[in-house]
Image: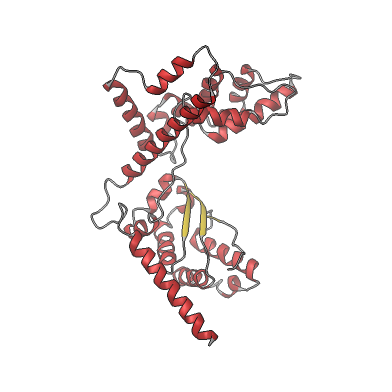
Amino acid sequence: MDSNYIPRRNCTTGGVTGFLQNVLNALDGLLGTNYAKQHSKQLVDRLIRRVSMLLANRFTGILVIEEIQLKSLGNDTGVFSLFLLTLTNFGVPVCLVGNPLAIEKLRKFSQDTRRFTVGGTISLLPFLSADDEEFRSLTQEIFSFSVMPINRELESGEYETIFRLTGGIPEFISRLNAEAQRYALAEGANEIKKSDLTVVYNGETFQDNHTLIRGLVTRNVGLLSELQDIPVSYFKAIWDREKNSESKTDQPSSLAKLAASSKGRQVTDDEKNERKLRAQIKRQKEKTEFDESLVENLPPDDFRNGGSTSVYVQKLEELQKSVEEKRRKENL
């Protein structure tokens, strides 16, 4: 489709038929066609095949489907999975973005799972501790965006407060900063105070999120279980692994040693970089453990653990050669 693109699609309400019509509307807006009207009365199974063919014939680079949620899938999981399977059979690359429980629901179909794990998975999760250097680095950067007359660097103890009030969720960190500034300006203050953060947390903006935040901060499985779209078993597995790891040794971690050695003096850039690197390694390890935990109960014929990459790359190359040969003959 040359340098043009279809705006990313959201898997929102309206069922699979509504979603497919949304894709056709996007194609019409880009190409000046009338596909949506032409196929408005087709049954969903025929519409699935037609949309997949159109996307393939237009050489769609990738279809990004966002906001895949449990409530948006509803009872259409099987039909939506059929659409995804048809897309991949036509060679259309797909990227799914959404709640891990909804993605896992789609993964119960092994045919889809084989295809969607070729490119790997990326898990974006809350920070698990106020001591995470990546959490501290991101939090400082977020709070550096300020309209206050006085904008200072965060003190060491304030990171723990911010983690306790946000559960380590980046969106809440950003919201806490914005709302605290709004409150401080309304009070005529020149800078954000620690007490302002608590006022904002207890206000209307955060009240409905207290269960989620407290569940993450206190690592309370019972609280998280009250929320239907939280992968509680994953968080519990991570917390249990950390607890078991701590019980096996009384020796302080290298990160703790580094923190202790730097207490009371200026931390050098090299030390900051080392802390950040260690935090990144830790998060990558947690992500790997999460991905591995998803494949423990897969059937023997599932390709999630590898083996499909070479097959599909080869098929893609064969398809590209076929298309190039067809074009060459048409130009003769």
Residue depicted at 53% across the width and 13% down the height? 265
Snapshot colouring: secondary structure
Viewer-closest of 58 and 331: 331
Instruction: Report whether 310 appears left or right of 93.
Output: left
Residue depicted at 43% across the width and 30% down the height? 278
Residue ranking furthest to the left: 300
Instruction: Report whether 146 appears left or right of 229.
Output: right
- Quarter location, residue 6: bottom right
Relative vertical location of residue 17 with respect to residue 188 in this rendering, above or below: below
Relative vertical location of residue 214 with respect to residue 251 in this rendering, above or below: below
Relative vertical location of residue 134 with respect to residue 264 in this rendering, above or below: below
Percent of width and height locating residue 279: 44, 31
Percent of width and height locating residue 286: 38, 36
Judge whether residue 205 can be spotted in this image: no
Instruction: Report whether 53 appears left or right of 311.
Output: right
Instruction: Report whether 234 appears left or right of 171.
Output: left
Viewer-closest of 236 and 293: 293
- Quarter location, residue 285: top left
Percent of width and height locating residue 141: 60, 31
Percent of width and height locating residue 315: 37, 68
Viewer-closest of 16 and 243: 243
Relative vertical location of residue 118 with respect to residue 232 in this rendering, above or below: below
Judge whether residue 223 can be spotted in this image: yes
Residue depicted at 30% across the width and 17% down the height? 250
- Looking at the rendering, in which quadrant would you find the N terminus? bottom right
Residue ranking furthest to the top: 264
- Quarter location, residue 119: bottom left
